[in-house]
Amino acid sequence: MTLQRRCQEVLDDLVATGAETGLQVAVHDRGEQVVDAVAGVADSRTGRPVVPETPFFSFSAAKGVTALLGHLLVERGLIGYDTPVAEVWPEFGTHGKTAATLRHVLTHSVGVPAMPGGLGPADLGDWRRVCAAIAEAQPRWRPGTETGYHSYTFGFLVGEIARRVTGRPMGWLLQDWVAMPLGISGELYFGVPPTELSRLARLEDSEPQPTDPAADSILAPWERQPSASLGNSLDLLRADVPSVGTFTARALSTVYAAVLDGRLIAAPQSVGLSTVAFEGTDQVFGNPVRLALGYPLGRIGASAGEASTTFGWPGGGGSYAYADVATGTSFAVTKNRLGRDFGTAQRLADMVTAELGPRAADRQ
């Protein structure tokens, strides 16, 4: 039985048992798409089915694409990893943030993890207001000394740096530098064009997620816990907020495949995507982390003995995407029922790893 068929059976079972409502999974093996499976409905209200072209709002899984754009700024000679942010964004250099660099941004070590100034979801579409508040923020630690998950501020940090050195917003760069060259326009967005909103999957909550008391003093509840009401908000979906995004599974798997095979980033630079750049305790959630430049290292649910050769990003509610440099595979799963964990993604990723992982040595 092919990997495509096995993945399809898992998806069908998840929908049939009520564990999932609608979802997609895509896998590339050394640049070739080997899985593009879908199941269920995109919108429970209408019964509209999921198809491979159905985009899903997948929260922070989009951070992988945002980090990629940061790397492309460096590859094009527009900024260096160790260039101070204030050199291109002078207003940012307040309260001791003059030492902050793009490297610190990519490793979530700038020190401004929470949306400052009491800004909330309704403010995310006001780019200049959000960036002005971040520029004026007092860092919680000296840049580069600690790391902590920059939930929404990450996208604005990378995005304003990009805007300052290119004159273009992140949504434009995403289309011009990534989506169009890879032939995935219409399947990868930060802000979704109004004409495309009817194609999107509609999110739904499974169960209320418990509050994490460890994060109470730093991130607001909406910054750390996904909700269907937020993900279905037309204001958020249309806004250029590059910490979150909307895409198909095959589009995101395509992006990671293109990173692995050098279509987007030259091989010498891509080493930084899977090499430890910061290791420590996350100051927001308290868990140990190992970060490459822009990506957490290691696969969700990996066994203790599995080598940390993957880099990627999970998205609140259960979506997930990653690339494995050892096997040359990329993986993405999108879903519209927001869960408490990544059980579905892990089950599918385990299957893919079991099938393609052991063949790595034979394909060198």
Image (cartoon, rainbow, N blue to C red):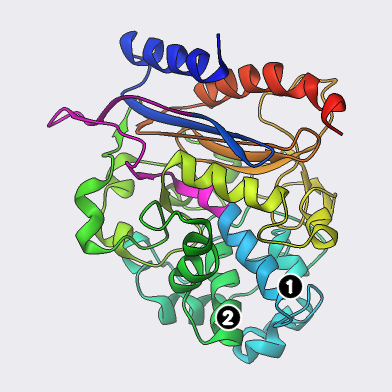
Residue range corresponding to the magenta coloring: 36-63
Task: Residue 68: say if magenta.
Answer: no
Q: Who comes first in sequence, dot 2 or dot 1? A: 1
Residue at x 78% of width, y 72% of height: 81
Residue 301 coordinates in the image, percent (x, y): 67, 23
Position of residue 298 relative to residue 135, above or below, is above
Residue sitting farthest toward the left: 46
Cα separation between marks 2 and 1: 25 Å
Name the residue tied to disc 2: 135
Decide if residue 201 is on the left or right side of residue 172: left
Task: Residue 55: say if magenta.
Answer: yes
- In the rendered image, is residue 166 in sight? yes
The quarter of the image holding the N terminus is top right
Question: How many other residues sit within 10 Å of disc 2, few (<14), some (14-19) or many (≥20)?
Answer: many
- Label 1 sits on a secondary structure element that is helix
- Label 2 sits on a secondary structure element that is helix
Residue 151 coordinates in the image, percent (x, y): 55, 54
Q: Which mark is residue 127?
A: none
The quarter of the image holding the C terminus is top right
Three-letter residue code for mark 2: Ala
Name the residue tied to disc 1: 75
Decide if residue 339 is on the left or right side of residue 195: right
Residue 165 coordinates in the image, percent (x, y): 61, 86
Query: Which image quadrant is residue 351 in?
Result: top right
Decide if residue 30 is on the left or right side of residue 12: right
Residue at x 51% of width, y 87% of height: 167
Residue at x 30% of width, y 63% of height: 238
Q: Are the residues tagged 2 and 1 within 8 Å (C-beta)?
A: no
Task: Give the label, 2 or 1, closer to the camera.
Answer: 1
Residue at x 43% of width, y 67% of height: 118
